[in-house]
Image: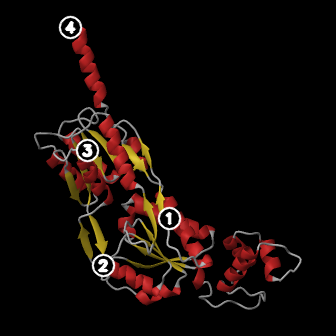
Amino acid sequence: MASIRDIAKMAGVSAASVSRILNNDESFSINENTRKRVIDIANRLHYSKEKNIRSPRNANADMSIGLILRHNSDSELRDPYFLAIHRGIEEEAAEWRLQVTKVFGMRDKEKDWDQLSGYGAIIMVGQMTDTAMDLIMDKNPNLILVDNYISDEKYDRIQTDFIAKTYKVLDLLYEKGHRNIAFVGGRSSIVDVDGSRINSRHEVRADAYSSWMQLHDLTKYSDVNIGQWSAEDALQMTSEILQGDDLPTAILVASDPMAMGVYKAISNAGLKIPEDISIVSFDDVEMNRYLTPTLSSIKMDSEEMGRIAVKVAREKMIGNRKMPIQIVCSSELKIRDSIRDLTKRINKFEISVIYKK
């Protein structure tokens, strides 16, 4: 049964304030919007002042969150980015005493779509087809999308700034004298209603890379290599890159697990990082500090993305907000030892020539 403390936590006020509001204390002066919010939450939680009256088992359904995940438990453990999003959702929900239940996985063949209507809001991590999302919205309009880069503005979306950060990394490499820059990343896909995956030609980092290379008249060096999101595929793709005659001076990698494969391929070829090839990646997982040399990477607090999704869901449940919002979370470029400044090499050569003269 919901308590006054539960209501106070969700409303963002003290338990004493909740008690006075629910007991219609006429001497208690408080903002009318706050009073309305407290009463609304109490009604949604089926709060009763009679302690001997128990709420029905699904009494808190209006304030519960249904979760639709792209990864199952096993694959999620191999992807620290999505694992952290899930952890953030669970932890933030616990802070607000909200129940979170995994409704189904995107890739499940059999899905109980009707049960979506029984939750106060739905958080979906990943991307499904328009048909699938329309079906979800039909069952529950309180849908929040996480790590989904659909352009349709009718959805609440929590996104990264990976497009902007891809440009920033490439600008940095350019300033350091790099022109022949390759890209190694994973294949993007969208999940359909029946759980099948539809491969997409678009992935935000790969698309940003291609656009940047074109804007800087470097299409002759443009080299997009797409495979599975694994170190093994990155190893194979990088090995093929290194068999060419015109080797890149830098490689932009879409994830840190893939960067492990890139490191291995460069080592197998008898080359060194960053002396021969500079490397920059995404994720900035803890293992980076143990690589030699340490890996430059873009850090996104994906756990915070999960927390923000819960806050948006909570606001939709208690505030009945109608206007969809887009939240772009900012990441941070961590520059370490895997990037070489080629301009310094040029300057040293010029100084040497001058000295000999």
Q: Which residue is mark 1?
A: 306
Screen quadrant of the C terminus: top left
Residue type beneath disc 1: Gly
- Which residue is found at the position 30% from the left and 83% from the top? 194
The mark lying in front, picked from 2 and 3, is 3
Q: Is residue 44 left or right of residue 66?
A: right
Question: Tags 3 and 1 in contact by the CB under 8 Å rule?
Answer: no
For label 2, the SS is: loop
Q: Is residue 289 left or right of residue 5?
A: left
Q: Is residue 27 left or right of residue 144?
A: right
Residue type beneath disc 4: Lys
Q: Which residue is mark 4?
A: 357
Alpha carbon distance from label 2 to label 1: 23 Å
Alpha carbon distance from label 4 to label 3: 35 Å
Question: Tags 2 and 3 in contact by the CB under 8 Å rule?
Answer: no
Give the crowd class for mark 2: few <14, some 14-19, many >=20 residues within 10 Å: some
Q: Does label 2 or label 3 sit earlier along the sequence?
A: 2
- Residue 257 location (% of width, % of height): 33, 53
Residue type beneath disc 2: Asp
Alpha carbon distance from label 2 to label 3: 37 Å
Screen quadrant of the N terminus: bottom right
Q: Please identify the residue farthest to the left as the structure is shown.
A: 245
Q: Is residue 140 visible?
A: yes
- Residue 100 location (% of width, % of height): 53, 75
Placement of 209 over or under 242, stated as above or below: below
Q: Does label 3 or label 1 sit earlier along the sequence?
A: 3
In the rendering, which numbered label is found on residue 216?
A: 3
Placement of 236 over or under 192, stated as above or below: above
Q: Which residue is mark 2?
A: 192
- Residue 180 location (% of width, % of height): 21, 41
Of 328 and 308, which appears nearest the observer?
A: 328
